[in-house]
Image: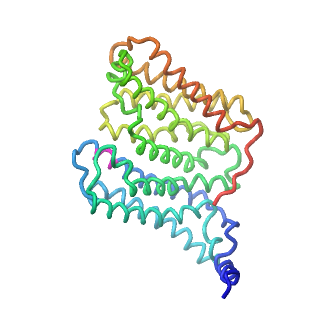
Amino acid sequence: MSVAGVGTRVLAVLGDPRRGGLPATALDDAVTALAALWLVSGLVLEAWAHGATPEPGSFFAAWHLVFDTGFVAMAGWTLALVWRRTRGGLRGFAAVPLGYRSTVVAVAGFAVSGVIDLIWHAYFGAQTGIGMLFAPGHLGLAVSMLVLVTSPVRSAMGRADVGEAPPLRLLWPALLTTGLAAALVMVFVGYGNAITYSAARIVEVLSQTDDSPVRELAASVVISAAVLLVPLLFLARRWRLPFGAGMLTMLPVIVVSGAETGGNNVSVLLAFVIAAVGVDLLILCLDPCAARPGIYWGFSCAAAFFTWSLYIGIAAAAAGQAPSVVELWTGIPIMAGLLGWLLGVLMLPSRHPMPPIALP
């Protein structure tokens, strides 16, 4: 049989891959978001366990249980969505809900990455420290998890009932899972996480003239500011965000950072919780969206400036003294604000509303 004939038969069975399936329902996305929360909660427990235990333990250690069962729940629910549509008479690509096609691929990718990780451990032993973040199996798991947990985001972009200015009750699965994706990214760039610094350490570093600690903190602020802000800017480019979007997208990153330190930097974590409330107030007052690029850019600058001003201010209050190098503690919030403005311009360079995005 010719290649063209094989292709025709495949298309007859699976359908046209350029056409997506029917949209998922609000309940479908809500269940997916809860399964994603389960999966990432397992990762949070692992982050806490690795921070508290010198030896990371085996692949089947007790703290892997939540993570492993979270993946089973995520994979099982994804397959259930496809099976339900297959029972309804849909076949091939049409049986996969809109926005979930890449989720099906990620389920297989996660399983393959898990096997690679087991083999890697068998031959090279368990990784410790920063090296574990660069292990091939772990990187494969990270990419797969990013695709899995963001399923409600892709789904919401294709659902007509969500609209351009959705209420929180419709958008919370997309908001929460975007925050969970940011938390995953923060885990894998944990070497540049400024949220894990204690208040005393922040003041100490910003009181030094030695370049090395200051460079590390400054680089961590840049990385952390981007991880916190880009998810919000991505969402605001598509929707007019409801009050609560800031908290839902920032809180998972805060929780992961607290787990990595064992909760030993409570004052800094509190600063970011307050910052999330402040960001929500900025969203409420400014209404940043793709149709208003100037407001969008202003929001991105103000949100970053406010967040990192609180970071230094509350650290100084908790430590009982202000940093002694004035240029550092005044310049870091300004630098963060300028970075926020730059990210806003990069995310929305056009003065025209963003066109609809075709989703896999």
The residue closer to the viewer here, 141 or 103, is 141
Q: How many marks?
A: 0
Can you say whether 239 is above or below 311 in the image? below
Q: How is the image coloured?
A: rainbow
Residue 261 position by quadrant: top left
Can you say whether 108 is above or below 63 in the image? below
Left or right of 72, for residue 104? right
Q: Give yes or no for residue 46 being in the magenta stretch.
A: yes
The residue closer to the viewer here, 73 or 349, is 349
Quadrant (top left, top right, bottom left, bottom right) of the C terminus? bottom right
Left or right of 169, for residue 110? left
- The x and y percentages for residue 289 are 69, 37
Residue extending furthest toward the right = 352
Residue 298 position by quadrant: top right
Q: Give yes or no for residue 219 being in the magenta stretch.
A: no
Residue 5 position by quadrant: bottom right
Residue appearing at x 48%, y 25% in the figure: 308
Prevalent SS, magenta region:
helix
Residue appearing at x 44%, y 24% in the figure: 311
Quadrant (top left, top right, bottom left, bottom right) of the N terminus? bottom right
- The x and y percentages for residue 8 are 70, 81
Can you say whether 108 is above or below 134 in the image? below
The residue closer to the viewer here, 150 or 102, is 102
Residue extending furthest toward the left = 54
Residue appearing at x 43%, y 18% in the figure: 313
Left or right of 13, for residue 206? left
Give the magenta-colored segment's residue range: 45-50
- The x and y percentages for residue 223 are 48, 35
Residue appearing at x 29%, y 51% in the figure: 127
The residue closer to the viewer here, 1 or 343, is 1
- The x and y percentages for residue 30 are 54, 55
